[in-house]
Image (cartoon, helix red, strand yellow):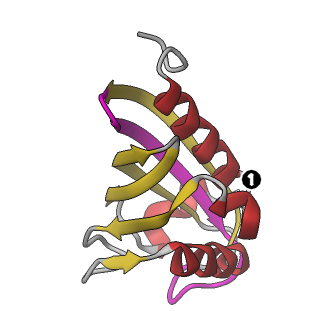
């Protein structure tokens, strides 16, 4: 199965492309069912994890535009079963401002597994399992742009 052979995979890929373009507001919300919930499981940036509704997700995307000047979500693999899609994604983001000990221009990288549940052609639930590469000023210096 190629990435675009299942309608929910097509939506999932388009959603990740929109987020790569730093989509916010209505452009981002259009992918989500009104009852959508986003779970970001504990990771290096959010040690306690985060649960967001659509408003919280849009607010986080807006705030992210101030912290990350460019980002890319590369969907490496996708599997669909019924109303669920599982994705393997590589994310890279370049910091726009200093973040703690990380200077502006530092490249962050995460290997992500995402599980999306759909209802009526919209994302009803998203669970992210983000595995960040070491987040230190020294670890990413060679990748800084």
Position of 109 relative to 119 (above/below): below
Residue visible at 50% across and 34% down in the picture: 75
Residue beneath disc 1: 21
- Judge left or right: residue 35 versus residue 58: left
Residue extending farthest front: 120
Q: Where does the magenta region start and end? A: 81-102
Residue visible at 40% across and 66% down in the picture: 38
Q: Quadrant of the N terminus?
A: top left
Position of 63 relative to 44 (above/below): below
Does 92 lie within the magenta span? yes
Q: Nearer the viewer, residue 79 or 111?
A: 79
Where does residue 49 sit, x and y in percent of width and height?
29, 77
Residue visible at 43% across and 63% down in the picture: 139
Where does residue 77 sit, x and y in percent of width and height?
40, 27
Where does residue 118 sit, x and y in percent of width and height?
41, 45
Q: Nearer the viewer, residue 38 or 46?
A: 38
Q: Quadrant of residue 27?
A: bottom right
Position of 66 relative to 95 (above/below): below
Q: Quadrant of residue 78?
A: top left
Residue visible at 34% across and 68% down in the picture: 40
Q: Quadrant of the C terminus?
A: bottom right
* Helix, strand or loop at mark 1: loop
């Amino acid at each position: 199965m190629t990435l675009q052979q299942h309608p929910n995979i097509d939506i999932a890929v388009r959603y990740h492309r929109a987020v790569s373009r730093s989509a916010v507001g209505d452009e981002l919300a259009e992918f989500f069912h009104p009852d959508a919930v986003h779970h970001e499981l504990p990771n290096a940036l959010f040690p306690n994890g985060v649960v967001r509704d659509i408003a919280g997700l849009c607010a986080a995307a807006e705030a992210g535009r101030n912290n990350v000047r460019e980002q890319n979500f590369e969907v490496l693999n996708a599997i669909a079963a019924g109303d669920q899609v599982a994705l393997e994604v590589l994310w890279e983001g370049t910091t726009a401002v200093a973040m703690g000990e990380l200077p502006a221009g530092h490249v962050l990288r995460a290997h992500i597994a995402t599980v999306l549940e759909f209802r009526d052609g919209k994302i009803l639930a998203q669970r992210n399992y983000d595995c960040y590469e070491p987040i230190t000023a020294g670890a990413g210096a060679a990748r800084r742009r």
